[in-house]
Image (tube, rainbow, N blue to C red):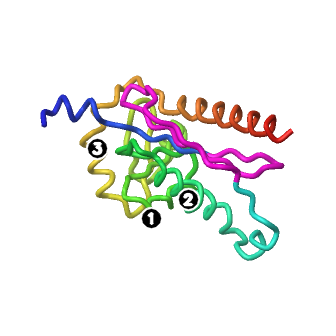
Amino acid sequence: MSSTNTQEQFRLGFLTAVEDAERGMVGGLLVTNKFGRPLEFQCTTPVKPNRTQQILYGHTLRPYLLSEVVGKTLIDKISVQPHLVLVESEELLSLREFISIPVACLESAETAAASADPLMKLGKQHLRFANSAEPDRDSIRKASGQVPDTADLLEPFDRIREALAETLKVAVARSA
Protein backbone atom coordinates (compact mmCIF):
# COMPACT_ATOMS: atom_id res chain seq x y z
CA MET A 1 0.00 0.00 0.00
CA SER A 2 1.45 3.38 -0.91
CA SER A 3 1.86 6.16 1.64
CA THR A 4 -0.43 8.38 -0.44
CA ASN A 5 -3.19 5.82 -0.15
CA THR A 6 -2.63 5.58 3.61
CA GLN A 7 -2.79 9.37 3.93
CA GLU A 8 -6.10 9.50 2.05
CA GLN A 9 -7.56 7.03 4.52
CA PHE A 10 -6.74 8.89 7.75
CA ARG A 11 -10.01 9.38 9.64
CA LEU A 12 -10.94 11.47 12.67
CA GLY A 13 -13.85 10.73 14.97
CA PHE A 14 -15.54 13.57 16.82
CA LEU A 15 -17.55 12.42 19.84
CA THR A 16 -19.76 14.58 22.02
CA ALA A 17 -22.99 14.43 23.98
CA VAL A 18 -25.74 16.92 24.72
CA GLU A 19 -28.19 16.86 27.57
CA ASP A 20 -31.87 17.53 27.21
CA ALA A 21 -33.64 18.20 30.52
CA GLU A 22 -36.65 16.07 29.61
CA ARG A 23 -35.17 13.30 27.50
CA GLY A 24 -31.67 12.81 28.92
CA MET A 25 -28.24 12.56 27.32
CA VAL A 26 -27.78 11.96 23.59
CA GLY A 27 -24.39 11.24 22.06
CA GLY A 28 -23.17 11.75 18.53
CA LEU A 29 -20.11 10.50 16.66
CA LEU A 30 -19.06 12.05 13.37
CA VAL A 31 -16.27 10.35 11.43
CA THR A 32 -14.55 12.54 8.86
CA ASN A 33 -11.63 12.34 6.52
CA LYS A 34 -8.57 14.48 7.25
CA PHE A 35 -10.25 17.46 5.56
CA GLY A 36 -13.37 17.33 7.77
CA ARG A 37 -15.69 15.81 5.17
CA PRO A 38 -18.23 13.48 6.78
CA LEU A 39 -17.86 9.75 6.20
CA GLU A 40 -20.38 8.50 8.78
CA PHE A 41 -22.57 9.84 11.59
CA GLN A 42 -24.24 7.89 14.37
CA CYS A 43 -26.17 9.00 17.42
CA THR A 44 -27.60 7.28 20.46
CA THR A 45 -31.14 7.27 21.70
CA PRO A 46 -31.62 9.46 24.78
CA VAL A 47 -30.20 7.97 27.98
CA LYS A 48 -31.82 9.14 31.19
CA PRO A 49 -30.81 7.48 34.44
CA ASN A 50 -33.52 6.87 36.99
CA ARG A 51 -33.29 8.15 40.56
CA THR A 52 -31.96 4.84 41.91
CA GLN A 53 -29.13 4.86 39.37
CA GLN A 54 -28.33 8.47 40.26
CA ILE A 55 -28.05 7.50 43.93
CA LEU A 56 -26.04 4.31 43.38
CA TYR A 57 -23.59 5.75 40.83
CA GLY A 58 -23.18 9.08 42.62
CA HIS A 59 -20.42 11.23 41.15
CA THR A 60 -19.35 8.39 38.82
CA LEU A 61 -22.65 8.45 36.90
CA ARG A 62 -21.77 11.12 34.32
CA PRO A 63 -18.34 9.64 33.38
CA TYR A 64 -19.95 6.18 33.20
CA LEU A 65 -22.75 7.41 30.92
CA LEU A 66 -20.39 9.39 28.69
CA SER A 67 -17.70 6.73 28.28
CA GLU A 68 -19.22 3.31 28.74
CA VAL A 69 -22.80 3.87 27.65
CA VAL A 70 -22.71 6.65 25.02
CA GLY A 71 -19.09 6.55 23.78
CA LYS A 72 -18.54 2.80 23.62
CA THR A 73 -21.98 2.25 22.07
CA LEU A 74 -21.23 4.70 19.28
CA ILE A 75 -17.78 3.26 18.58
CA ASP A 76 -19.25 -0.27 18.47
CA LYS A 77 -22.03 0.90 16.13
CA ILE A 78 -19.95 2.83 13.58
CA SER A 79 -18.83 1.00 10.44
CA VAL A 80 -16.13 3.51 9.35
CA GLN A 81 -13.62 3.29 12.18
CA PRO A 82 -11.63 6.46 12.94
CA HIS A 83 -7.89 6.38 13.63
CA LEU A 84 -8.37 8.91 16.45
CA VAL A 85 -11.42 9.88 18.51
CA LEU A 86 -11.47 13.54 19.54
CA VAL A 87 -13.55 14.70 22.49
CA GLU A 88 -14.26 18.09 24.06
CA SER A 89 -14.44 16.93 27.66
CA GLU A 90 -11.72 15.31 29.76
CA GLU A 91 -14.49 13.17 31.25
CA LEU A 92 -14.50 11.25 27.97
CA LEU A 93 -10.78 10.40 28.06
CA SER A 94 -11.68 7.31 30.09
CA LEU A 95 -13.38 5.97 26.94
CA ARG A 96 -9.89 4.79 25.92
CA GLU A 97 -10.13 2.05 28.56
CA PHE A 98 -13.04 0.48 26.65
CA ILE A 99 -12.00 0.84 22.99
CA SER A 100 -8.91 0.06 20.92
CA ILE A 101 -8.79 3.50 19.23
CA PRO A 102 -6.72 6.39 20.62
CA VAL A 103 -8.80 9.09 22.35
CA ALA A 104 -7.68 12.70 22.81
CA CYS A 105 -9.29 15.76 24.33
CA LEU A 106 -9.03 19.13 22.57
CA GLU A 107 -7.47 21.85 24.69
CA SER A 108 -7.85 25.60 24.31
CA ALA A 109 -4.75 27.67 23.48
CA GLU A 110 -4.81 29.15 27.01
CA THR A 111 -4.98 25.73 28.66
CA ALA A 112 -2.30 24.36 26.34
CA ALA A 113 0.07 27.24 27.17
CA ALA A 114 -0.40 26.73 30.92
CA SER A 115 -0.25 22.93 30.83
CA ALA A 116 2.57 20.99 32.42
CA ASP A 117 1.43 17.85 30.59
CA PRO A 118 2.81 17.08 27.13
CA LEU A 119 0.28 18.19 24.52
CA MET A 120 0.39 17.49 20.81
CA LYS A 121 -0.62 19.99 18.16
CA LEU A 122 -3.06 18.79 15.51
CA GLY A 123 -4.53 21.29 13.09
CA LYS A 124 -5.17 24.51 15.02
CA GLN A 125 -5.71 22.75 18.34
CA HIS A 126 -3.73 20.91 21.00
CA LEU A 127 -4.55 17.39 22.15
CA ARG A 128 -4.39 15.87 25.61
CA PHE A 129 -4.24 12.10 25.77
CA ALA A 130 -5.02 9.95 28.80
CA ASN A 131 -2.02 9.68 31.13
CA SER A 132 -1.16 6.12 30.14
CA ALA A 133 -1.51 6.69 26.41
CA GLU A 134 2.10 7.22 25.28
CA PRO A 135 1.77 4.61 22.46
CA ASP A 136 -1.35 6.48 21.28
CA ARG A 137 0.58 9.76 21.24
CA ASP A 138 3.36 8.18 19.21
CA SER A 139 1.04 6.60 16.62
CA ILE A 140 -0.97 9.79 16.15
CA ARG A 141 2.18 11.93 16.03
CA LYS A 142 3.28 9.89 12.99
CA ALA A 143 -0.04 10.55 11.24
CA SER A 144 -0.51 14.15 12.42
CA GLY A 145 1.17 15.59 9.34
CA GLN A 146 -1.79 14.33 7.30
CA VAL A 147 -4.14 16.84 8.97
CA PRO A 148 -3.73 20.36 7.55
CA ASP A 149 -2.32 22.94 10.00
CA THR A 150 -5.35 25.11 9.21
CA ALA A 151 -7.86 22.44 10.29
CA ASP A 152 -10.28 23.71 12.95
CA LEU A 153 -10.98 20.59 14.97
CA LEU A 154 -13.58 22.38 17.11
CA GLU A 155 -15.94 23.05 14.20
CA PRO A 156 -17.17 19.43 13.69
CA PHE A 157 -18.49 19.45 17.28
CA ASP A 158 -20.81 22.32 16.31
CA ARG A 159 -22.12 20.20 13.43
CA ILE A 160 -22.74 17.26 15.75
CA ARG A 161 -24.61 19.37 18.30
CA GLU A 162 -26.74 20.86 15.53
CA ALA A 163 -27.50 17.39 14.11
CA LEU A 164 -28.38 16.08 17.58
CA ALA A 165 -30.68 19.04 18.22
CA GLU A 166 -32.39 18.35 14.90
CA THR A 167 -32.72 14.66 15.76
CA LEU A 168 -34.28 15.50 19.12
CA LYS A 169 -36.76 17.89 17.41
CA VAL A 170 -37.83 15.16 14.99
CA ALA A 171 -38.21 12.64 17.82
CA VAL A 172 -40.35 15.07 19.81
CA ALA A 173 -42.51 15.82 16.75
CA ARG A 174 -43.09 12.10 16.16
CA SER A 175 -44.14 11.48 19.74
CA ALA A 176 -46.57 14.42 19.75
Q: Which mark is residue 97?
A: 1
Magenta part of the chain: 17-46
Q: Which mark is residue 15?
A: none
Residue corresponding to mark 3:
141
Q: Please say whether residue 148 is one of the residues in the magenta stretch.
A: no
* Extreme residue in the right direction: 176
Q: Please say whether residue 23 is one of the residues in the magenta stretch.
A: yes
Q: Is residue 17 left or right of residue 106?
A: right
Q: Where is residue 39 in the image (x, y as percent from the top left)?
A: 43, 32
> What's the residue type where badge 1 is placed?
Glu
**Quadrant of the snapshot with the N terminus:** top left
Q: Where is residue 114 in the image (x, y as percent from the top left)?
A: 51, 45
- Name the quadrant containing residue 146: top left
Please tell me which residue lies in front, 49 or 171: 171
Residue corresponding to mark 2:
67
Q: Where is residue 119 in the image (x, y as percent from the top left)?
A: 40, 47
- Where 37 sits versus 21, above or below? above
- Where 150 sits versus 168, above or below? above
> What's the residue type where badge 3 is placed?
Arg
* Residue at x 46% of width, y 46% of height: 78
